Image: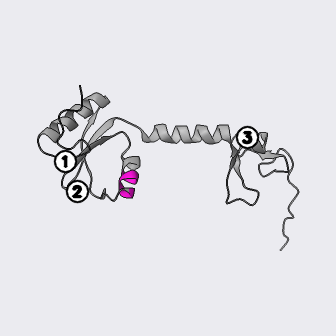
Amino acid sequence: MKYKTRTKPTPRSKNYFDDKGCVCNSCNTYKEYQFIIKEPRYPNGYGRRCKECHNELNRQSYLKRQGKTKVYMLPNEDNYVGITQSMLDRARRGRRQGMDYSDYRILMECDTRKDAEELEALLHDMGYPGKYGYKKNPIQ
């Protein structure tokens, strides 16, 4: 069985890097290391994407996760009521704070954040716990 021999990467290939910079895997352009994201897991300490492409991919990912503002309830946390645009991000932050998001329920998806805040305030006035607790209506 004959094996293919590796050829030395050229400046136009995706895996090209030298002492001054490398080729971004997203836009396929050669950039100096000051424009490449830092990644400690790689031997040279730099990632494989430029900062512009990295920021754009993060922005697209963030917008993809966003949506209508949701009013949610956590039955395992004494019916805690809150609002969020991204349940995934909210659950991550909540788990770090020690809250149980395993059995959340979306009560309503509102078109505007103001509508969601009004519903949340109404539920808090009815006795459901939450960030604003039993305070007076936070929307004024």
Rendering coords of residue 16 (x, y %)? 81, 50
Identify the magenta region: 91-96
**Would residue 24 appear left or right of 67 to someone viewing this image?**
right
Q: Residues within 10 Å of mark 3 (few under 14, many from 20)?
A: some
**Would residue 4 appear left or right of 124 to someone viewing this image?**
right
- Above or below 4: residue 70: above
Residue at position x 85%, y 61% from top?
Answer: 6
The reply to whether discs 2 and 1 touch (Cβ–Cβ < 8 Å) is yes
Q: CA distance from mark 2 to mark 1?
A: 9 Å
- Quarter of the rendering occupied by the N terminus: bottom right
Q: Is residue 61 magenta?
A: no
Residue at position x 85%, y 50% from top?
Answer: 19
**Chief SS of the magenta region:** helix
Residue most toward the front? 135
Element type where label 3 sits in the image:
helix
Residue most toward the bottom? 1
The answer to whether one can see residue 111 in this image is: no
The numbered dot on residue 71 is: none
Q: Residues within 10 Å of mark 2 (few under 14, many from 20)?
A: some
Of mark 3 and mark 2, the one earlier in the sequence is 3
Amino acid at circle 2 = Glu
Of mark 2 and mark 1, the one earlier in the sequence is 2
Residue at position x 26%, y 34% from top?
Answer: 116
- Which residue is under mark 3? 35
Q: CA distance from mark 3 to mark 1?
A: 47 Å
Q: Nearer the viewer, residue 94 or 65?
A: 94
The numbered dot on residue 129 is: 1
